[in-house]
Image (spheres, rainbow, N blue to C red):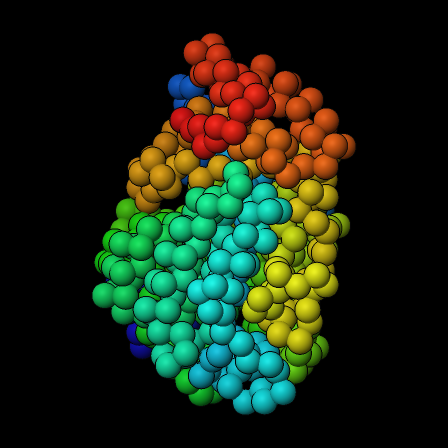
């Protein structure tokens, strides 16, 4: 029997099936244990410390007890604490980004993805560097500053050299006042050497979804191709960190396997990164299986309803308080609004999940990786965020100022990150309002900026931020940052 060890570098030991099953049994046994649940909730609460806050976080067992709990008033308390934590460490800011699909060539046989090798009727496409440039200009013309690049796994069509060329092209495009300032990368598990190349190329976060932590299901869902190797895939984040990438993003595809098992595995993975590398995941994403070409989500019998999905997001926020949490346009406006109230800190906007989709006048569907539920324009998403009391942020300053990995987390954990991120969010919002916003969004945005500037505690920071925003409004100077 394999022994559970969060400090091990072996996948079966830090994501240990026996430990997950024992955790689920413990959670089921204690799901109505009000005294224990109250202690766990009290532990999760943010505590004032100096000018900031601190959070203890939760173990995978504690968090699993909360997820199993079905007592309405306790679930409501989870939601309230999740929002408290999010506001304590990330404020009312919501970071915006867009995915950019480079190639849908793939040699894997993943049963839930339309890019699987056996799908012979999907149009295969790989962007040339000129096409990458055109896509980037289209995204810049919307107002985006942060991208997550996506590509299938194909060593012939999508080698690491192609990915690196695309990153260079993206960073080299300077169109009007537009620049992509941060490129996050979501590509297949690779070698330490290739992670070093990605780091040297100036990427932000390396993102890799586990899809499922249930090894038996994982092997069935990935019957062919290099992704079939569960251990190599699960240990990818350790190789990425060995290669110098200190911001990594986790995620599972909810709906493939029983959600309580996936949740425990996800929290254990975060604990493993903290135990081995001293820094947990920079982000955790919460995608659900969606319909796509050749894929029917009903073939997977582990789908979760919106209320359960909300509880999962809240419990992740309680367990891993300092991580950024991402929900994409897979989800509807209604679901995204609900998740914003329980800990989400990043959302995509105006996403197109097809290769070359941004340069098309109408959203193409023939090469989409999944159905996009929220199809609003970026301007509509920005306006909606402000209407719900959130600051739309296009900030990438931490990455470019070297505030990554443990340096970011130390600032986040003592609450000091707000001294940078709040004014940076307002300045990048002003850039968006001047260069891309509709008149209605612009009017609403500057009213929000005026009110939010008053909330900056430091007179000096408020003065500098105000001067910079005035400069943005009166000139073409951009990219001010703390």
Position of the C terminus by quadrant: top left
Task: Answer whether residue 44 is visible to the viewer in this image.
Answer: no
Tell me: residue 467, above or below residue 108.
above
Tell me: residue 303, above or below residue 251.
below
| 385 sits to left or right of 345 | right
Q: Quadrant of residue 248?
A: bottom left
Q: Residue at x 46, y 69 (%)?
A: 128
Q: Residue at x 41, y 62 (%)?
A: 166
Task: Answer whether residue 446 is visible to the viewer in this image.
Answer: yes
Q: Quadrant of residue 232?
A: bottom left
Near-viewer residue (385 or 473): 473
The x and y percentages for residue 69 are 62, 53
Q: Residue at x 41, y 78 (%)?
A: 157
The x and y percentages for residue 357 are 62, 64
Q: Residue at x 72, y 44 (%)?
A: 380
| 441 sits to left or right of 203 | right
Tell me: residue 64, above or below residue 338.
below
Near-viewer residue (279 or 258): 279
The x and y percentages for residue 235 are 32, 67
Q: Quadrant of residue 301?
A: bottom right
Near-viewer residue (278 or 394): 394
The x and y percentages for residue 293 are 66, 78
| 423 sits to left or right of 15 | right
Position of the N terminus by quadrant: bottom left
């Amino acid at each position: 029997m394999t022994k559970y060890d969060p400090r091990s570098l072996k996948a079966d030991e830090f994501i240990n099936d026996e430990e997950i099953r024992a955790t689920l049994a413990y959670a089921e046994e204690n799901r109505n244990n009000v005294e224990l649940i109250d202690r766990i909730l009290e532990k999760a609460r943010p505590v004032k410390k100096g000018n900031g806050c601190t959070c203890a976080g939760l173990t995978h067992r504690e968090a699993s007890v909360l997820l199993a709990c079905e007592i309405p008033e306790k679930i409501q308390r989870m939601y309230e604490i999740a929002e408290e934590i999010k506001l304590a460490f990330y404020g009312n800011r919501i970071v915006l980004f867009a995915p950019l699909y480079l190639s849908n060539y793939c040699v894997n046989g993943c049963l839930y993805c339309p890019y699987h090798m056996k799908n012979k009727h999907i149009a295969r496409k790989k962007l040339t560097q000129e096409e990458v440039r055109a896509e980037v200009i289209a995204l810049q013309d919307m107002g985006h500053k942060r991208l997550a690049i996506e590509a299938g796994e194909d060593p012939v069509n999508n080698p690491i050299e192609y990915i690196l060329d695309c990153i260079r092209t993206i960073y080299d495009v300077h169109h009007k006042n537009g620049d992509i300032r941060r490129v996050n990368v979501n590509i297949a598990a690779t070698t330490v050497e290739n992670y070093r190349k990605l780091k040297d190329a100036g990427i932000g976060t390396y993102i890799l979804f586990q899809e499922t932590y249930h090894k038996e299901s994982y092997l069935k869902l990935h019957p062919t191709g290099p992704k079939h190797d569960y251990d190599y895939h699960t240990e990818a984040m350790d190789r990425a960190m060995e290669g110098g990438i200190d911001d990594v993003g986790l995620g599972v595809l909810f709906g493939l396997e029983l959600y309580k098992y996936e949740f425990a595995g996800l929290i254990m993975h975060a604990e493993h990164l903290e135990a081995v590398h001293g820094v947990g995941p920079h982000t955790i994403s919460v995608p659900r299986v969606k319909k796509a070409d050749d894929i029917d989500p009903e073939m997977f019998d582990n789908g979760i309803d919106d209320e359960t999905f909300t509880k999962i997001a809240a419990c992740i926020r309680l367990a891993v308080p300092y991580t950024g949490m991402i929900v994409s346009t897979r989800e509807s406006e209604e679901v995204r609004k609900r998740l914003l109230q329980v800990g989400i800190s990043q959302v995509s906007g105006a996403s197109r999940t097809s290769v070359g989709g941004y340069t098309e006048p109408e959203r193409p569907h023939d090469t989409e990786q999944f159905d996009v539920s929220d199809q609003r324009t970026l301007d509509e998403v920005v306006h909606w965020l402000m209407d719900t009391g959130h600051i739309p942020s296009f900030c990438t300053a931490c990455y470019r100022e070297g505030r990554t990995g443990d340096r970011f987390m130390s600032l986040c954990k003592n609450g000091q990150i707000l001294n940078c991120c709040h004014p940076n969010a307002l300045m990048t919002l002003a850039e968006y309002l001047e260069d891309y916003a509709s008149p209605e969004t612009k009017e609403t945005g500057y009213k929000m900026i005026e009110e939010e500037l008053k909330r900056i505690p430091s007179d000096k920071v408020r003065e500098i931020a105000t001067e910079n925003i005035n400069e943005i409004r009166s000139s073409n100077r951009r990219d001010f940052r703390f």
